[in-house]
Image (cartoon, grey):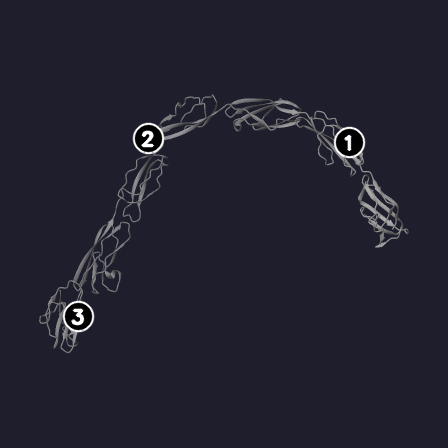
Amino acid sequence: SVQFQWMQDQSSGTCCDNWGIDNVVINSYDCAGYTYNYTHLPSSDDEPIQNVNVLSETTYGVWFSNGADSCYASVTVPISEVDAGPDVSICSEDPAVTIGADPITTNAGATYTWSTGESGTINLQGEGQDYGQITVSPTTTTTYTVTTDFNGCTSTDTVVVSVLDITPTFDSIPDVCQNTTAPTLPAASNNGVTGSWSPSVSTATAGTTTYTFTPDAGECAVLTTLDITVIAQPELDAGTSQTICDGDGVMVAAYNPDGAVITWESPIEDDVIFYPTNSDYYTVTAINEGCTSEDSVLITVEALPVVSFLGDTLFGCEPWTVRFTNTSTSASDLTDCQWTINGQTFTDCNTVTYTFPYGGLYDVSLTTTSATGCVESETYENYIYVEDYPEASFISSETNLSNLSTEVIFNNASTGAVSYEWDFGDNTPISTEKHPTHEFPNDASAGYVVTLTAFSELGCADVSQFTINVKEELLYYVPNTFTPDGDMHNQAFRPVFTSGFDPYDYTLLISNRWGETIFETNDASIGWNGTYGGTSCQEGTYTWKIEFKTLATDERIKITGNVNVIR
């Protein structure tokens, strides 16, 4: 509670200036000439000031009046009250936490003290510890008390910082066998804590492994562990794969150093011969402490070799070369191969090449031995047929021809042939007649190589050739008169060559009576039109001279004569 009074010193100021609170001295004094009325106080105008029990921050005042003027004096009475803030829960691994709250007080300068020894002074304009807040790092659940003191008025409050420490719980994992599927560990504990495990669960190695469960962030829980035991698989080896020939027996024996109980698939037993009919894997099982191991061994039953081979060409003309390829079953696994061809022996398991020198029918044999010693043979009778070559021959009715008569009759004298092809060497179509008649070109001197190809039934061929010569006869005509009179007839003098000359080696000269050359050309298609220097020559006799080369003999020929010009 507080009491209101006049201040001790009223020597100056007004009544309003000297009215206040004193918690020690209680006086009643009239302010000279003034009347007063209290506000928020239970006292009447004529009663002395009473003690006031302040339950909350309140403003108290009094009106003073002397009839001429008045004034109002007031004072705000604060209280000392503290709030330590809400209780806090943290995880054991969490960092420090700040507790406390702003003290509810208007008294700047009030002090506070925490049970930890932290203390300070209230500063209404400050922050942080000035408002009674502290940072704590408890390892167990702890209650903290804060006390605020203002002018001897104290107030306390507490805050509980709970340190949570949940221990995740899990069901135990049964023992597992080595190299089986690893068990999956739960992502959440029986009491609802989520997290992750490390290391990754593996059954590759026998023994007991401890796995650690780390709670997720935000889960107030501690690390926990779980043991998983991996039982070793019994050591087992079914043995080395074997290859046997069809009909042979074989024996298997499993390696089992751990002494586990072993069982072969029926009807196989350890160290007992059996006779498999097909290639297969045979499985043995070992059981030790409920854990099973299996292993298999491959027994390959090799059928007796099926011998086969292939010749690239089975018939041809002598001498005939054949490449034989081994196509036997499992040819790539054969260790020995013997070929018998025309009385000769060859050893090669892939290919053999042999040349048959003469015509005839030939047997071929092949004997093979596999890696397991399985032997088999095969003979192909009359497998290769070699045919003798025919003999091509012919005669012709003529050998040297004139281009004026180029027909030749050919008489075929070949032996051992069934068909024929004639190539006459003149770009005409091939003839398949046995005794053809052929007419050669007559437009040029040439030698034509006639080729006869005679074929046997298998196409064996022989060739015979003979050259037919065609001589081009020299034919030409030189007129002795022409009439260059402009009537479109006989307007030029031009020698006419039919055959036998080289048109690229030709010269024509025209001379007048004085021996002067008045016309010259190297083109046999161009004649003299009876002019000289653009002027018509007078009628009369003129001399010509022609020089050319023959096609048949390359002989150079010079001829001269006269020509009459008539207008």
Report the amino acid beneath label 2: Gly
Horizontal side of residue 527 vs 255, given as left or right:
right
| Cβ atoms under marks 2 and 1 closer than 8 Å | no
351 relative to 2, above or below: above
6 relative to 473, above or below: below
Q: Secondary structure at mark 3?
A: strand
Residue under label 3, please give it: 74
The spot of residue 181 in percent (x, y) is: 36, 36
**Of tags 2 and 3, which is closer to the observer?**
3
The spot of residue 442 in percent (x, y) is: 78, 37
Count the marks: 3
Residue under label 2, please give it: 290
Q: Quadrant of the N terminus?
A: bottom left
333 relative to 169, above or below: above
Residue under label 1, please give it: 408
Quarter of the view holding residue 173: top left
**Dot 2 or dot 1, earlier in sequence:** 2
Quick one: which residue is furthest to the right in this view?
A: 514
Report the amino acid beneath label 3: Ser
Q: Nearer the viewer, residue 515 or 284?
A: 515
Q: Nearer the viewer, residue 78 or 455?
A: 455
Quarter of the view holding residue 312: top right
Horizontal side of residue 343 vs 274, given as left or right:
right
